[in-house]
Image (cartoon, rainbow, N blue to C red):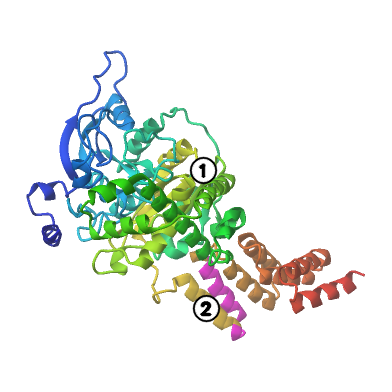
Amino acid sequence: MAESARRRRKGSNETSPRVKDFGAFIERFELLPAPQPPPPAARHPLSDLTFAVADNFDVKNSVSGFGNPDWKRTHEPAGKTAAVISLLLQRGATLVGRTVMDELAFGVTGENLHYGMPINPQLLLQIPGGSSSGSGVAVAAGLVDFALGTDTIGCVRIPAAFCGILGYRPSHGVVSNIGILTNSQSLCTVGLFARDPSIFHRVGHLLLQASQTVVKREKRFIFADDFFQYSRIPKQKTVHVISKAIEALSGYLPAKHMNVSHYIASNVPILKEFGEPYTKLHQGTTTLQALSTIMLSLQKYEFKTNHEEWINTVKPSLGHEISTRVRVALNSTYDNVKYLYKARAELRAALNSLLKDDGVLVIPTIPDFLSKHSSKRKMSPEFEDRLFMLLCLAGLSGCCQVAIPLGKHESYPISLSFIAAHGADKFLLDTVLDMHSSLQEQISLASSLAPLPDFNGDMDASELLKEKGNAAFKGKQWNKAVNFYTEAIKLNDSNATYYCNRAAAYLELGCYQQAEADCNQAILLDKKNVKAYLRRGTAREMLVSYKEAAQDFKHALVLEPQNKAARDAEKRLRRLMS
């Protein structure tokens, strides 16, 4: 570990085998593909491509180490090669070795006490992420064309984000796990890494054994606005890049924005069974914390069921982080197991209902980079909490997710994720490939733009403009307030408050149609925005649309029965209409 750290500090000038392969491999070997069919038959679709697999994929006559020498020492060689490896060999790819992984697939950093931490090619002093760290590094360093790992609670998506490459977590159960050591069978899936989107698409389709026929359908994108509160990367490099790419393509409906946490709170009733603090589901963070806790509890329960006997018998040597996680899993009691599985089923049903077969949910893959949280390249508890809140949607529900690199910010890779319904994997992979060229254009444009000012640690530019608008409003500078709110909306057009505040300024200026239009947009973004109903009611009253105005004030009263302004306005309108 000390030598690994020294090499990172010196950079990549070392010539040792470890530095040449970025520490990605545990062992190198070669399994050749099936012979090519004789002409005129087409060549195998993966001909001339190389791949690697994590240390938990079986290869006939050798022992999968599960990231730990004690596991390898106490288990027999595999009688068969894992089904997915055999499939890829049959399709023409060449397997070139096993890669480093967090021990027992129980970590998220990429550290391994016995084999060291693979070196992140994007940032030599940054962790590569885990548990499938070596597979991610091998792809990012260009050592192989693609690689496989397993994703339990984010073990493919995390390295993909940290290493700036594509990472695919398939829908749970759609890719064979035969011949693969799993940490938690209800969460674990085979995962795929690649740099090239066409290779990513081709291998993904083969893993799914899906037809190459393209089914044309419109695509709906939904931005999970509440999830983006955990990302400090400017929206001009994330949300706006995706939005502009969508606008440039045919067959894509205008993107929508929503609070996904609120949707989940209303559609996953089992969450209420977990008691405090999960009963306060009007708070989006709490909803995600509940889902994250359920996912981690399910992982620990199944890990204990699968591996407790071996751990107690062998007493393996484990790294500190992994040892802590294992000890917690083995010492925990699980009285609410049936609720864990029920929550999993309800979350999948809720997301399938939201996304159907044409929807794509957009979220950040990871919250931020560790250098902003710790100088020791380790994940703080706060960082891990936010990380698992972002990863739990696909992890717990079993829906499919692709982590997509979107360039860099302050030298760190940016990664957003697309999530589709369970079983909509082909649709998701097709969408990623279809959008690639448009995304690259928008990434290039975004990187050339001057960065938005970071006015303080917590407030982005749009929030500062809103506050300036509020100050102008209080000073009765109505036109100035409108200008500030307009600039805020240009930077962030998904914030209902900006439209609602501009509507208030328009009312003061007597611009009632503009005020009504802004309130329409605010209500579209937030159906419980009482101020928007009150201000739209006022605008409609001034436009002599008394019936519609009365409906707005009634709606405000439903949301806030004690609202005096709404009650007085409704009475006034009743008199006017009579």
Q: Is residue 481 visible?
A: yes
User: Looking at the picture, which amino acid does disc 1 mark?
Assistant: Ala
Secondary structure under tag 2 reads helix
Residue 170, quarter of the rendered image: top left
Residue 534, quarter of the rendered image: bottom right
Q: Which disc, if any, is residue 421?
A: 1
Look at the image and tell me in which quarter the C terminus lies.
Answer: bottom right
Q: Which disc, if any, is residue 258?
A: none
Front residue of 361/82: it is 82
Give x and y (percent) for residue 365: 40, 54
User: Looking at the picture, which amino acid does disc 2 mark?
Assistant: Glu
Q: Which disc, if any, is residue 467?
A: 2
Look at the image and tell me in which quarter the N terminus lies.
Answer: bottom left
Give x and y (percent) for residue 410: 30, 64
Looking at the image, how many numbered discs can be counted on the residues? Answer: 2
Task: Please report the residue visible at 83 percent of the width from the left and 64 percent of the height from the top.
Answer: 547
Which residue is most to the right? 578
Task: Please report the residue visible at 35 percent of the width from the left and 55 percent of the height from the top.
Answer: 330
Q: Earlier in the sequence, mark 2 or mark 1?
A: 1
Front residue of 125/235: it is 125
Q: Is residue 338 above or below residue 200?
A: below
Q: CA distance from mark 2 to mark 1?
A: 39 Å
Q: Nearer the viewer, mark 2 or mark 1?
A: 1
Q: Is residue 404 above or below residue 367?
A: above
Give x and y (percent) for residue 94: 23, 30
Left or right of 342, for residue 94: left
- Residues rendered magenta in the picture: 474-489
Give x and y (percent) for residue 169: 39, 44
Q: Is residue 307 above or below residue 548?
A: above
Count residues near mark 1 (Cα–Cα under 10 Å), then give few for <14, some for 14-19, many for 20+: many
Left or right of 566, for residue 335: left
Task: Please report the residue visible at 45 percent of the width from the left and 36 percent of the height from the top.
Answer: 426
